[in-house]
Image (cartoon, rainbow, N blue to C red):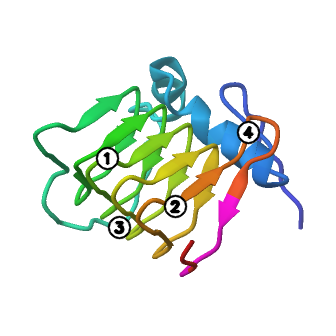
Amino acid sequence: KVMGYEVTTFAETVDGMKSYFDLNMKMLDSKTRKVLFNRERPVYTKTHDSMPAKYCIGSNVNNSLIADGCVIEGTVKNSILFRNVTVKKGAVVENSIIMQNAVIEKNSVVQYTIMDKVSVISENAESIGTAGKIAVVKKGETI
């Protein structure tokens, strides 16, 4: 038995890393979030009670979504950070998606990158992609 449901609001197709990246970046727009997360169609998820994100003295965050448990000592711009991500002092994260429990060590640079969970960018290292070619750091990988 096959059923259908007409979607008249926000709908996107994810068919690869680029479309996944682009769709997530749309979440930085408050209009997109309002359409997707409205009271008439609630989204249910598991609750992970943890501390709120911690923004340390000297950190700089701009146009980003930061989940609970994150510790930000460096710079985060136009990015999405899942739970318990750590961005150490001097590190720069721009135009990236960083999944849970990932760590960006001191003085590292991450641009146009999708980092899977529990991955690490080592001190003074970099992961740099472009808007047309997104870099990917695999689950548990250290660069």
Q: Which residue is mark 2?
A: 125
Chain-order first, disc 1 or disc 3: 3
- What is the three-letter code of the residue carrying label 2? Ala
Chain-order first, disc 2 or disc 3: 3
In 3D space, how far apart are the residues under numbered discs 4 and 1 (Cα atoms)?
21 Å
Q: Which residue is mark 4?
A: 130
Secondary structure of the residue carrying numbered label 4: loop
Q: Position of residue 19 (x, y in %)?
A: 78, 44
Q: Position of residue 113 (x, y in %)?
A: 62, 51
Say if 77 sits above or below 120 in the image. Answer: above
**On-image quarter of the C terminus:** bottom right
* Left or right placement of residue 141 versus residue 68 in this view: right
Mark 2: few/some/many CA within 10 Å (<14, 14-19, 20+): some
Do the residues under discs 2 and 3 have CB atoms within 8 angstroms?
A: no
Do the residues under discs 4 and 3 have CB atoms within 8 angstroms?
A: no
- What is the three-letter code of the residue carrying label 3? Lys
Secondary structure of the residue carrying numbered label 2: loop
Secondary structure of the residue carrying numbered label 1: loop
Numbered mark located on residue 77 in the image:
none
Report the span colored magenta. Answer: 136-140
The image quarter in which residue 86 lies: bottom left
Report the residue at 85% width, 53% height from top: 15
